[in-house]
Image (tube, rainbow, N blue to C red):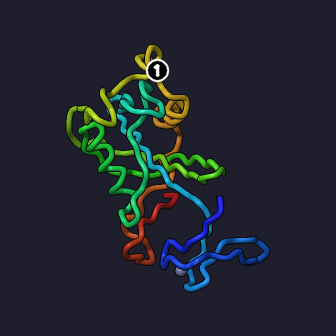
């Protein structure tokens, strides 16, 4: 699909060779259409060896149990996005510990999914009744008889059997970096 008009100023776009790659660029301003990307975030909240799951009330994946999650917003830190999604979808307060998994989907809309291990803080699971119609903490055994999405099964294995804390949120980086979220190996 060709991008005909600049999403920044509305002027016509042209095809330009940039570092050997043909890209659509604005004839009026500096805007370049680099591609179509999206970033998803997911939460792995573990409590007493049980993982927080929600049941999707809407397509795609209606009826499937998944971990809570969503897509990032333009200027919202991803740590806040995932905490908000967990609270909105499942009624549970949780805070980010670190990043424990990444999925790369290089396709028409290139999606990168970041999975966070999160610390349970408070709240009984309660579905939002819109995006999800059920929520709860479940053991691996209980999940055997549930319709759990394949990707979620992969994440649950990491949450329950992972041998590392992954990339931890760096609250006091050796080089201050205001406005940026930093994650690093311990
Ligand atoms: Zn423009």
SS state under label 1:
loop
At 54% from the left edge and 79% from the top edge, which residue is drawn? Answer: 11
At 42% from the left edge and 24% from the top edge, which residue is drawn? Answer: 63
Whether residue 125 appears in this view of the structure is no
Q: Quadrant of the N terminus?
A: bottom right
Picture quarter containing residue 81?
Answer: bottom left
Whether residue 106 appears in this view of the structure is yes
Residue 96 percent across, percent down from the top left: 36, 51
Residue 114 percent across, percent down from the top left: 50, 50
Establish if 38 lies above or below 90. below
At 57% from the left edge and 83% from the top edge, which residue is drawn? Answer: 30
Establish if 158 lies above or below 118. above
Determine crowd level at label 1: few under 14, some 14-19, many 20+ residues with C-alpha closer than 10 A.
few
Establish if 169 lies above or below 17. above
Residue 52 percent across, percent down from the top left: 35, 33
Residue 98 percent across, percent down from the top left: 43, 52
The answer to whether the residue bearing label 1 lies less than 8 angstroms from the nearest atom of ligand 1 is no
In this rendered view, identify the residue nearer to me: 163 or 151: 151
Q: Seen in the image, is 142 located left or right of residue 18?
A: left
Picture quarter containing residue 45?
Answer: top left
Q: Seen in the image, is 11 located left or right of residue 74?
A: right
At 41% from the left edge and 40% from the top edge, which residue is drawn? Answer: 44
The residue at the far right in this view is 20
In this rendered view, identify the residue nearer to me: 78 or 100: 78
The residue at the far left in this view is 123
Q: Seen in the image, is 23 located left or right of residue 147?
A: right
Q: Which residue is mark 1?
A: 147
Q: Seen in the image, is 5 located left or right of residue 170?
A: right
In this rendered view, identify the residue nearer to me: 111 or 150: 111
């Amino acid at each position: 699909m060709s991008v005909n008009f600049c999403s920044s100023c509305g002027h016509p776009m042209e095809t330009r060779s940039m570092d050997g790659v043909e890209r659509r660029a604005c004839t009026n301003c500096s805007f370049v259409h680099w591609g179509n990307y999206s970033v998803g975030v997911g939460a792995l909240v573990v409590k007493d060896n049980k993982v927080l799951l929600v049941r999707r009330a809407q397509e795609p994946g209606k009826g499937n149990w998944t971990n809570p999650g969503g897509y990032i917003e333009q200027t919202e830190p991803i740590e806040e996005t995932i905490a908000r999604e967990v609270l909105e979808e499942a009624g549970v307060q949780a805070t980010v510990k670190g990043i424990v998994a990444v999925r790369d989907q290089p396709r028409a809309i290139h999606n990168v999914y970041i999975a966070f291990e999160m610390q349970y803080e408070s709240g009984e699971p309660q579905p939002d009744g819109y995006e999800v119609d059920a929520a709860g903490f479940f053991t691996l055994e209980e999940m055997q008889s549930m319709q759990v999405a394949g990707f979620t099964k992969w994440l649950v294995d990491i949450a329950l059997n992972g041998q590392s804390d992954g990339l931890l949120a760096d609250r006091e980086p050796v080089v201050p970096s205001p406005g940026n979220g930093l994650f690093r190996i311990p």
